[in-house]
Image: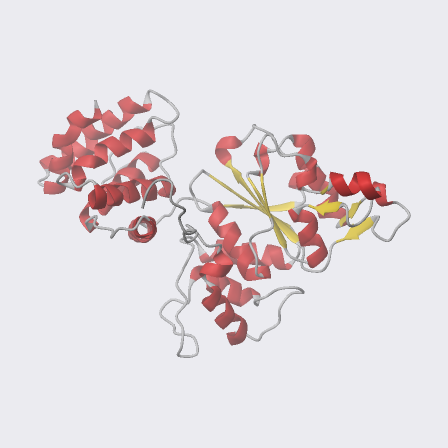
């Protein structure tokens, strides 16, 4: 194939949750015939099962539901109860704690689509929460329903589904406040269509909003007290169980490498060491109880997945020996994102827990200690 040859469209890199887990969603819809809130595709109990998994149980002897979110089941249950009460849900936490993934899973399970999404940025306008206009039709016909362009939120209101707002605190305060009347009055007025039946859009049963916000963005565009009162806040924290985090990193990194057309070939021992480094630096204390100076950057599970995936791609396409030799360089790429002083903190971690584990006789940590020069 030459560079100028047309190529057939490639498969999509990532499918939305409602397509990726379509078989499970269809099975759960048929399996649980209990009461459902208006507009819901699944029962609240089935939504929790979809997200947290069915454990060792094989439902109806036919399907075992795999867990998709690693976290407290009680957190997921509170989120589901909030949405069943048609109240806004705000997921907050450090970057990389799977807030967006949980939001997507909830929307897919509750209403069958996670696509009604607004990505919050400094450039997001009020139209993203209310409506805009097809200006060609507006000039040709004047204000009309056909010229009106619904926002994802307005579409969710009309159809009784879940709208998602990612990084809500990245939006300017005056833009955020467009949600206040939507979440309290459950209607949107269209003054340009005054005197017609389309002058006001009322929310259908089942409509609600899931928003996410990073704690690191606090103060960027602080939410008003009025808007905060329209949401139930739930904090999504780091994964508490080390084995569960290693399993998640392995699973997601494997998926990334397979999408890149290769086989994931990173040893479990390397993944264990990588996740241990992330957990120690994240918490400020090693598994043995030794104090660790925390870097300013967030050593999140999502970052650990990206490092593991990079190791897997390098091992598949650029094999140069032991993949463990690449770990220090990739860790530097993570810790240098925010504060230059974090480089020194990583070196301090190497001179502390890494050295002490090496002295205790671990071959893996001895090799990592020998790689300290790669951190210069």
- Name which residue lies at 83% across and 44% down: 141
Along the line of sight, which residue is nearer the eye, 92 or 123?
A: 123
Residue 331 in percent (x, y) is at 27, 33
Quarter assignment of residue 358: top left
- Name which residue lies at 70% across and 49% down: 154
Residue 22 in percent (x, y) is at 48, 65
- Name which residue lies at 46% across and 67% down: 24
Along the line of sight, which residue is nearer the eye, 105 or 275?
A: 105
From this view, report whether residue 33 is shown above or below residue 227: below
Question: In the visual, does 334 lie left or right of 73?
Answer: left
Work out which quarter of the rendered image holds the C terminus and state it. top left
Residue 333 in percent (x, y) is at 31, 30
Quarter assignment of residue 278: top left
Residue at far bottom of view = 61
Q: Using the rendered image of the protein, determine whether residue 292 is visible from the camera's viewpoint.
A: no
Q: Using the rendered image of the protein, determine whether residue 76 is visible from the camera's viewpoint.
A: yes
From this view, report whether residue 17 is shown above or below residue 232: below
């Amino acid at each position: 194939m030459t560079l100028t040859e047309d190529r057939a469209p490639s498969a999509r890199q990532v499918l939305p949750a409602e397509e990726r887990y379509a078989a499970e969603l269809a099975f759960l819809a048929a399996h649980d015939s209990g009461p459902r809130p208006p507009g819901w595709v699944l029962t609240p109990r089935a939504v929790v099962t979809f997200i947290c998994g069915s454990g060792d149980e094989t439902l109806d002897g036919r399907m075992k539901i795999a867990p998709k979110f690693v976290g407290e089941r009680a957190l997921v249950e509170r989120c589901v109860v909030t949405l069943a009460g048609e109240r806004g849900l705000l997921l907050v936490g450090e970057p990389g704690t799977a807030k967006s993934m949980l939001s997507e899973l909830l929307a897919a399970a509750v209403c069958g689509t996670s696509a009604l999404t607004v990505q919050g940025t400094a450039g997001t306008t009020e139209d993203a929460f209310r409506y805009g206009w097809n200006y060609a039709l507006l000039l040709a016909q004047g204000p009309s329903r056909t010229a009106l362009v619904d926002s994802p939120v307005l579409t969710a209101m009309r159809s009784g589904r879940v709208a998602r707002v990612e990084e809500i605190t990245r939006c300017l305060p005056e833009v955020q406040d467009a949600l206040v009347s939507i979440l309290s009055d459950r209607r949107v007025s269209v003054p340009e269509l005054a005197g017609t039946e389309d002058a006001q859009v009322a929310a259908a049963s089942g409509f609600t909003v899931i928003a996410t916000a990073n704690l690191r963005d606090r103060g960027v565009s602080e939410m008003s007290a009025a808007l905060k009162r329209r949401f139930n806040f739930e904090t999504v924290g780091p994964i508490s169980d080390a084995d569960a985090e290693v399993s998640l990193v392995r699973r997601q990194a494997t998926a990334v490498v397979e999408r890149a057309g290769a086989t994931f070939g990173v040893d479990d021992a390397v993944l264990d060491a990588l996740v241990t480094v992330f957990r120690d630096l994240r918490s400020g204390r090693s598994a043995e109880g030794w104090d660790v100076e925390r870097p300013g950057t967030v050593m999140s599970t999502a970052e650990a997945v990206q490092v593991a995936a990079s190791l897997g791609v390098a091992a598949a396409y650029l094999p140069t020996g032991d993949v463990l030799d690449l770990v220090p360089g990739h860790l530097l790429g993570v810790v240098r994102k925010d504060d230059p002083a974090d480089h020194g903190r990583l070196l301090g971690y190497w001179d502390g827990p890494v050295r002490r584990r090496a002295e205790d006789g671990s071959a893996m940590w001895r090799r990592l200690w020998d790689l300290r020069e790669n951190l210069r």
